[in-house]
Image (cartoon, rainbow, N blue to C red):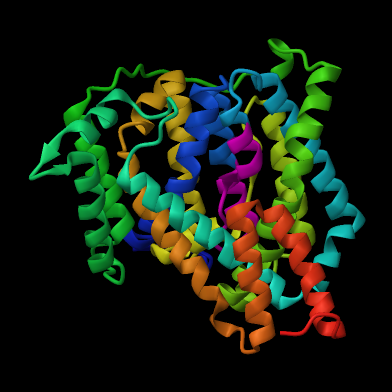
Amino acid sequence: MVWIGKHYKFDRNELSGSLGDLGTLLPLALGLILLNGISPVGTLFMVGMFYILSGIYYKVPTPVQPMKVIGAYAIANYETITPNIIYASALLIGIILVFLGISGLISLGKYVPKAVVRGVQISVGTVLLIQGLKFIIAPPKQGIVPEFQIQLSNISIFGISAYFLIGIVALIATFLLLENRKLPAALIIVSAGFVIGLILKKPHVELGINIPEPIFLSSSISMNDLLTALFLLVIPQLPMTIGNAIIAQHDLAKTYFGDKAKRVTYRALSISQGLADIASFIFKGMPMCHGAGGLAAHYKFGARTAGNNIIIGSIFLAIAILFGNSSIELLQLIPFSILGVLLFFAGAELMTMIKDLKDKKEFFVALVMMAITLVSNLAYAFFLGLILHYFIKRGIFKV
């Protein structure tokens, strides 16, 4: 174990915690790279830089994730959502978040009721847990999974799919190792998954020195790109970013780390995400954010200091710089069933945040928000949760 100052510890548990959010990050990042065609080098480089700089500034574990609404919509419509539209969405949402942070408007988040914050957290947790189970059962249909993982799902061992069996074994191992400080769960299952991938598929990688190319050297963003990005990607994403990556993230950081998380303010979270997204636009990366689910994942698997950020950020930087475009070959080696296990436990951890709600009215608001999220999306759940809480408080609606 190595300590650097009082905020950075480097040991096997911090390493394990740093891997805990790969289940969220990798599927969306791989989808945007492989299906939409954004730059692998720019994407992985910016993820690494955002992780490291977030750790240096906030001095507590701070997640870095793809923006889920933007990522999911872009992947689902990859035939029409071009790389330039995705880059444009990073620029636009970056400018908006910086404005909200600098102006102080984002600080209005402190008036969001606790029941609504918990509603956001349990909603995100439920979505992560369900998605994790889906990944464990079978690989996703879209072309972000390498052929060997698809073949694994077709191989039967004692009547059970080999892909599913890997996920079940990883799930059991994680249950057994979750509190083990000598054999951290995420480190063990991700390492095992990587080894399985190496055995089943030889990656074609090329070593070199690669740096992201600034967008102005090869691309030109049109007004049509900006308008498409604004209405299809940015506006739908904003409520989730504000609710999950700022308000819920702030609350969870304070819950986990207390006074150590004094820099994790609404304004700081808004500005750091905004600046990261503007930089991601410049270097052709994906739109990025923080997020309560990511923090829950890092914490669940062992992260307790900002050393977590330095570790995972350095890993992504090294992969981007040393392997360039071929880095995708390495990331695809980890079976998606193992990424599903990480998602499952991250979701379960986030769902436990509801335990401090004492009033049945608060429980009702949080659970209604979860239901709305499952049938629609978190943006609607956030706004309807605020309205429902107000109606109950005013006696307009009784529980």
Q: Which residues are magenta?
A: 50-73
320 on left or right of 112? left
* Residue sitting at x 40%, y 51%: 132
Q: Is residue 264 visible?
A: no
362, 249: nearer the viewer: 362
> In this view, which residue lies farthest toward the bottom?
358
Instruction: Return the x and y of residue 242 as percentages of the image width and height.
Output: 74, 56
Q: Position of residue 141 (x, y in %)?
A: 41, 31
**Percent x, y of residue 344:** 40, 57
How many circles with numbers are drawn on the protein?
0
Furthest toward the right, the residue is 103
Is 277 covered by the magenta stretch? no
Could you tell me which quadrant the C terminus lies in?
bottom right
Q: In the figure, is residue 100 to the left or right of 325?
A: right
Q: Which residue occupies the foreground of this view, 323 or 152?
A: 152
Please say if 196 is above or below 200: below
Question: On the image, which quarter does residue 50 sit in?
Answer: top right
Q: Quadrant of the N terminus?
A: bottom left
- The residue lying toward the viewer, choosing from 322 and 21, is 21
Residue 379 in picture, x, y percent from top left:
72, 53
Residue extending farthest to the top is: 218
Residue at the image point whose x is 47% and y is 61% from the top? 347
* Magenta: main secondary structure: helix
- Looking at the image, can residue 111 be seen? yes
Q: Residue at x 80, y 33 (%)?
A: 231
Residue depicted at 40% across the width and 36% down the height: 140
Q: Is residue 107 above or below residue 85?
A: below
Quadrant of residue 358 in the image? bottom right
Left or right of 11? Residue 249 is right
